Image: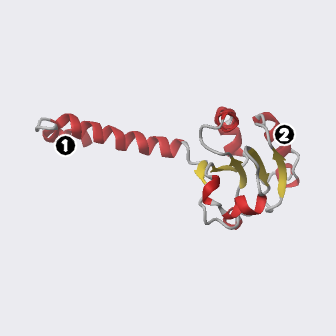
Amino acid sequence: MFMSAYSHLLRAPGKSLLMTLFCLVLGNTAHAAENAMFRVLAADSATLDAYRWKKRPVILFAASQQDAKYIEQVRMLKQQQPALEERDIIVLTDTSPDTKSMLRSQLKPEGFEIVLVGKDGGIKLRETSPLSAEVLLSTIDRMPMRKAGQN
């Protein structure tokens, strides 16, 4: 229905531009929905209180999005996305050390670092090398809230 309602626009001059824009909007919307658990950490985020008792933040710090360890970590996490979602994981990334985010200032990562924060707000795991999703999942599965069936 949507396409038929706007098909006259596709026959107009510049239709390839319109179609390109249309595809980009749809593609970006689908991409954002698919990666809702992966978010950029806002520089002014002083705390993770918004996630307390709801989510388990996994924070990825790196010098840039091109950091080899960062790329490897994101790849490993995306491969296990359904299992991570089942455990209420949200992945927050900070790949801009120059912005001096509040959490970066508090945690003082040097280079690449992955930090798992529990639903209670406490740091549960901190590593300077990429962590397999299996290690992350088993760490979560040993947590009291997870054992009690509270994801």
Answer yes or no: is residue 1 visible.
Answer: no
Name the residue at 80% across, 62% down: 120
Q: Amino acid at mark 2?
A: Ser
**Residue 6 % position (x, y):** 19, 43
**Element under disc 1:** loop
The 10 Å Cα crowd at callout 1, few under 14, some 14 to 19, many 20 or more, is few
The figure's colour scheme reads secondary structure
In the rendered image, which quarter is residue 100 located in?
bottom right
- Report which residue position mark 1 lands on: 6
> For this rendering, which residue is in front, 28 or 68?
68
Q: Compared with residue 79, is residue 49 higher up or lower down, i.e. above or below?
A: below
The 10 Å Cα crowd at callout 2, few under 14, some 14 to 19, many 20 or more, is few
Whether label 2 touches label 1, CB < 8 Å: no
In-image side of 145 versus 112 (left or right): right
Question: Whole-Å distance between the Cαs marked 2 and 1?
Answer: 50 Å
**Element under disc 2:** helix
In the rendered image, which quarter is residue 63 located in?
top right
Q: Compared with residue 126, is residue 75 higher up or lower down, i.e. above or below?
A: above
> For this rendering, which residue is in front, 146 or 98?
98
Q: Amino acid at mark 1?
A: Tyr
**Residue 137 % position (x, y):** 79, 40
Name the residue at 71% across, 53% down: 57
| Label of residue 106 in the image | none
In-image side of 27 versus 11 (left or right): right
- Report which residue position mark 2 lands on: 138
The N terminus: image quadrant: top left
Mark before the other along the chain sequence, 2 or 1: 1
